[in-house]
Image (cartoon, rainbow, N blue to C red):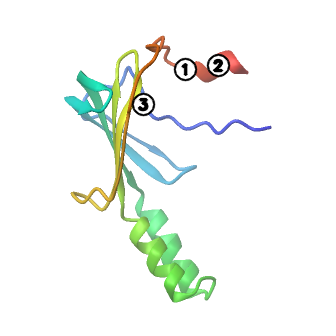
Amino acid sequence: MSVYDQVWVDEGAEVDSLWTDPTVGTESLVAGYESVTVPAGTYDDCLKMVITPLPELRDSVEARYQRDESDEQLYLQEKEAASWQTVRWFANGVGLVKEQIGPSGDARIVRELLAVDVKGTGQVDSLQQNR
């Protein structure tokens, strides 16, 4: 069994800080804090993260198509997806409360927290306890 490690949020990061994750081909920006209303309630001071694909990801999609490793339909789908961004809002003590995925300014996929039965512990890295 393997554990997929990806940093979703660095609670110590300052607004406008930026980091890249070459293993998944993304760049993450701490965009600030916002209030977010979802079916589970309104959460103030949610940390907003904006994740965008690195140019190398788009380049690799293009290269695969040029080498005839993908047909045109797959190429067009991958090319579009490689330009999408993900915006996530994290509430302190709860975790991810909202996620929007799609081209910049056009959220095609929206996920929202529906309910909270027990508030989380707010631990920085819960994976460490399971290893």
Give the distance between the C-alpha atoms of the residues marked 2 and 1, in whole angstroms.
6 Å
The Cα atoms of the two marked residues, 1 and 3, are separated by 10 Å
For disc 3, the marked residue is 9
Find numbered disc 2 in the image and state the secondary structure of the residue it sits on: helix
Mark 2 and mark 1 residues within 8 Å of each other at the beta carbon: yes
Q: Earlier in the sequence, mark 3 or mark 2?
A: 3
Q: Quadrant of the N terminus?
A: top right
Taking the image as drawn, is residue 107 in sight?
Answer: yes
Q: Nearer the viewer, residue 22 or 69?
A: 69
| Residue drawn where x is 38% and y is 32% of the image | 114
Residue placed at 62% from the left, 23% from the top? 127
Quarter placement of the C terminus: top right
Q: Badge 3: how crowded within 10 Å, few (<14), some, or many (20+)? A: many
Q: Mark 2 is on which residue type?
A: Gln
Q: Residues within 10 Å of mark 2 (few under 14, many from 20)?
A: few
Q: Secondary structure at mark 1?
A: loop
Instruction: Please say if 85 is above or below 10.
Output: below
Q: Mark 2 sits on what residue?
A: 128
Position of residue 17 measured from the top left corner of the image (x, y, whole percent): 30, 34
Q: Amino acid at mark 3?
A: Val
Q: Which residue is mark 1?
A: 125
Residue 8 as seen in the image, left or right of residue 45: right
Judge by depth and name the residue closer to the eye, 90 or 52.
90
Q: Is residue 74 above or below residue 13?
A: below
Task: Tell me where residue 98 sits by quadrant.
Answer: top left
The three-letter code of the residue at mark 1 reads Asp
